[in-house]
Image (tube, grey):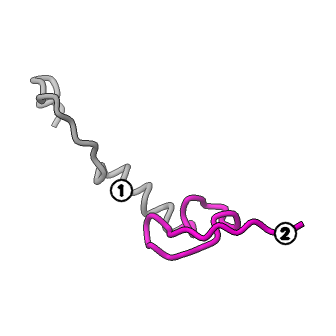
Amino acid sequence: MSKKVLMVKCPQCAKKFNYHESKWRPFCRERCRQVDLGHWINETYTIPSKEPVSESDKKDE
């Protein structure tokens, strides 16, 4: 049986790796996964919205 090969770029560091051999998919290694998680926890990543900010949302900031 042949091994599956799918070369992709890590979304964090852009290093090419075999997607099927990484246990941290879609990342190439654990460090890249942790860095990405840190961005989500620190709210570095945001999703733009066309809705106006409500008064209750302003109080949360």
Residue that appears at 80% across and 68% down: 3
Q: Which quadrant holds residue 18?
A: bottom right
Q: Assess disc 1: are there few (<14), some (14-19) or many (≥20) residues with their C-alpha within 10 Å of its C-alpha.
A: few
Magenta stretch: give its range.
1-30
Number of numbered markers:
2
Residue 14 or 31: which is nearer the viewer?
Answer: 14
Element type at mark 1? helix
Q: Does the segment drawn in magenta span residue 14? A: yes
Mark 1 residue type: His
Residue that appears at 63% across and 64% down: 19
What residue sits right under mark 2 in the picture? 2
Q: Locate residue 60, reporting x and y percent.
A: 18, 32
Left or right: residue 6 compared with residue 55: right
Say which mark, if any, is on residue 39.
Answer: 1
Question: Quick one: quadrant of the N terminus?
Answer: bottom right
Element type at mark 2? loop
Q: Assess disc 2: are there few (<14), some (14-19) or many (≥20) residues with their C-alpha within 10 Å of its C-alpha.
A: few
